[in-house]
Image (tube, rainbow, N blue to C red):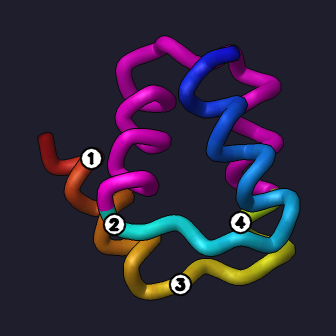
Amino acid sequence: MSALRFYLAKVADGVTLDEGEAETAFDAIMSGQAEPVESAGFLMALKVRGETPAELVGAARALRS
């Protein structure tokens, strides 16, 4: 199971990610390790559930690195 698929399952279950988990998930997306369908599912799950400040911080860190 890819790292992103693990975090996708957590988000789909309504679990919030901490900053480190979100950074790892977005790093998988940005580095090309995740399949496009996994990336889309993860981003849609975040949108539907609602992003938390910690998840946004983690995403920003991954995007900046």
Q: Position of residue 56 (x, y in %)?
A: 41, 73
Amino acid at circle 4? Leu
> Residue type at mark 3?
Thr
The residue at 60%/79% (across/down) is: 51
Q: Which residue is mark 2?
A: 19
Q: Earlier in the sequence, mark 2 or mark 3?
A: 2
Name the element at disc 3: loop
Residue bearing mark 4: 46
Coordinates of residue 42 in the picture (x, y in percent): 72, 47
Mark 3 or 1, nearer chain start: 3
- Disc 4 to disc 2, C-alpha distance: 14 Å
Residue pictured at 16% horizontal, 49% vertical: 64
- Mark 4 or 1, nearer chain start: 4
Residue 4, by quadrant, is top right
Distance from Cα at disc 2 to Cα at disc 3: 10 Å
Q: Decide: is 9 above or below 5.
A: below
Pointer 3: what residue? 52
Dot 1: few (<14), some (14–19), or many (≥20) neighbours within 10 Å? many
Residue 2's disc is none
Q: Secondary structure at mark 2?
A: helix
CA separation, marks 4 and 1? 16 Å
Q: Earlier in the sequence, mark 4 or mark 2?
A: 2
What span is colored magenta in the figure? 20-44
Residue receiving disc 1: 62
Residue 48 at x, y percent in the picture: 85, 74
Q: Amino acid at mark 1?
A: Ala
Contact check, label 3 and label 1, Cβ < 8 Å: no
